[in-house]
Structures are given as structure tokens and as C-alpha cells.
Amino acid sequence: MSTLAAIVQDYGAAYEDTFGERLLPSHRRTLRDIAVCRTVELGGHVYYCEHCQETHYHYHSCRNRHCPRCQHQQGQAWLERQTTLLLPVPYFMVTFTLPATLHEVIRQHQKAFYNILFRASAEALQAVAGDPRYIGGRVGMMGVLHTWGRQLNYHPHVHYLVPAGGLSEDGRRWLPARRTFLVPVKALSMVFRAKFRDAVKKTAWFDQVPPEVWQQAWVTHCQPVGKGEAALRYLAPYIFRVAISNTRILKVAAGQVTFRYRPSGSNAWKRCTLSVFEFLRRFLQHVLPKGFVKVRYFGFFSHSSQHLIPWIRSLLDADAVPLGDEALTGQTEHLQAPILAPRPVRCPTCQRVMHCIHHLLPRSRGSPMAA
């Protein structure tokens, strides 16, 4: 089976040599991390199964958030931590997409423009949702940045998971949205474009933006995605998905990579074949700036306002005893994410718990995370 790690192991060094100093440090580090992920280079543990009397080696992961191996099993752990934010209401997925005419300048100044994308989209959604014709209150937003399209092309956009309703201005009433309608996307698109433009005007790169971008129609999308945990499960893959998974890579031959993708609006798989260097170039353009936070919370989901979640639940529960003013200014100790116990390592043959009998020290770098 072809994997991204195998491609990087075979061609990564040549790619680095070809592009030299033009290769960003974050791209170089990502290539090197993926190449050694879950290999003896990072060390690991040796486990023994008393039932099968077999020995198994478990090597450490590279912890790089762009590595498909490391991100594959993170969704369930995230779901368990997010249950503290669940509300018993329908949810919507709202997506903000930037036009292609902006891509070049964004690619050159990624961190600044991704921050603007988050801020402008959250402000636009709150502004439109605050209109009494729609919700008329403060909404909660859980957002995640994506930068890729189905063929690894550059396509920056942000997805928000939004409960169907908001908190009134005085904080004492829950204002429900309609079950199948949150906000008008055409009005939302125009407000988003205006807020994005105003934010870019404050930067040094406003003159680099083609003027026609502020005249064309921008695209937003909104769809219902179910209630509670079902909505979180809908969002989880968006958060932990990387630009391409190993399951989509079909083959590597004669210096070319073939992978599958689904065209927008179709359930049928198609194939795309690229040279190895073009494949790596497309993949690396989705490596985020170092330290950039790709998952953000706004409105009453923001970290400074999460103490309101129990109060909102009480407003939604007809049998709840009304809370006093302290609920509006309460602390958040009870909302802290639970500490998840490490999962036992099970034998791949009999599924019984194995015991660690030896630690393997890393060869290439220290303190990797066990996986």
C-alpha cells in the first residue's frame, strides 16, 4: 500500500535538495517528521502478549499535525473533550470560502490572512444572526480552518458548527432559530466580504489585492447537521483531517502519484495523477504556520464565556430550576475537559492487553509522543 510516509521517504530528500533555501522551515520539518513517524528512529516500546507469547513493537509518532498517521485517531478523543459544550438543540454547519483571486496574496502572508479570515467570518455571522429577523441574540461558534480542495489545490475556507439559536442581550432568554434556517447566506456573504475588506485595509498588503475581488460575489454555505453529539461527529473529521489521507493514495510509479478524489456534488470517485514533486508541492502548501491555532471558539463558546453553557442548558430545559445571577458570571471549573486515561495496548492477534517489557530510545530526536 502506498502511503504519504513512503513517498516522503523515497523522494523527500531529493525534493529538499531541488528547492533548497526556497523551502520553508515548516515544510522541511514536516517532510522530516513524516518520514520517520512510527519508525525506530523515534524510539518506542516493546510489548509482550502472555496469551499468544508474541512480541510486538510500537514506535512513537512524530506528533506533526499534518501527518495522516498521527491525526487518524484523534477525532474520538476530541469528541470526548467537547461533550462539555453540547447543547440539546439542532446545529448548522456554516462555511466561508475565499475567492480564488485572493489566493496568491494569502499564500504569501498566510498567518495574517488566516487570522483575518477567522475574525471577519465570526464577526459577520454574529452580525447577521444578531438581527431580530433571524435570531436576535448572541450565538456560539466552533470553527476550523481548511486550506485544500479535493485535488490538493489551494482553497482556504473555514467551517463553523453553530447551535440553532442564541442568547438574548440580557442573557436571560434562549432565542431559537428555525429548524432548517439559520441566516440568509447572500446577506452573510456581503457582510463577510465587507468585514474582510476592512480588515485587509489595515494591513500593508491591501494594494496587492486585485480591486475586482471586492466587487465579485463571495460564497458562504449553511446546512443543518443534526443535534448534539451527531453534530460534533459531523465536525470532528473536518478538524483532524489532513490534506490527504493514506487511503486515498492509490499508487506511486515512474515518478508519479495517483490518488482518488470525489468531485464536488458527486459520489463517484475519480483519479488524479501528478508528478511526485507536484504532489509534494501541493501537499506542503497546506502546512500551517508554526503555532497557528486552526480550531477556534467564538460567542458563548469562547473560552471566556463557556461558564454560560450550564445557564443556557437550564434555559433549554423546561423542568430546570431557574438559576440566579451568579450563573451569568460563574466559573468554569466544571467545564474543564476530562482527563483521558491512556488506552491499553492490545495484541493484534487475540486483542488481549499486552504488557510493556522494554523501552526503545529515539535515534533522531527526543521526547516523541507514544502512539
Image (cartoon, rainbow, N blue to C red):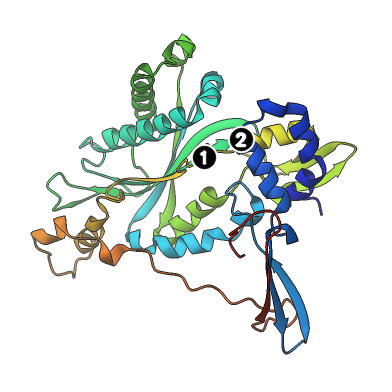
- State the residue at coordinates (68%, 33%): 282
- State the residue at coordinates (74%, 49%): 5
Near mark 2 (Cα within 10 A), the count class, few <14, some 14-19 or many ≥20, is few
User: Along the horizontal axis of the image, is 352 left or right of 83?
Assistant: right
Q: Amino acid at mark 2?
A: Pro
User: Along the horizontal axis of the image, is 284 left or right of 231?
Assistant: right
Residue 176 in the image: state x and y as whole percent: 25, 50
- In-front residue for pair 28/371: 28
Can see residue 149? no
Give the answer, above or below, for where 3 lies relative to 292: below
Q: How many marks?
A: 2
Near mark 1 (Cα within 10 A), the count class, few <14, some 14-19 or many ≥20, is few
Label 2 SS:
helix
Which residue has dot 1 on it? 290
- In-front residue for pair 54/361: 361
Q: Are marks 2 and 1 in contact (CB under 8 Å)?
A: yes
Q: Residue furthest right?
A: 254
Residue 127 in the image: state x and y as whole percent: 27, 33
Residue 50 in the image: state x and y as whole percent: 72, 89
Residue 103 in the image: state x and y as whole percent: 55, 23
- State the residue at coordinates (84%, 43%): 252
Q: Residue furthest left?
A: 325
Disc 2 to disc 1, C-alpha distance: 9 Å
- In-front residue for pair 32/319: 32
Quadrant assignment, res 262: top right
Quadrant containing the C terminus is bottom right
Quadrant containing the N terminus is bottom right
Can see residue 369? yes
Which residue has dot 2 on it? 25
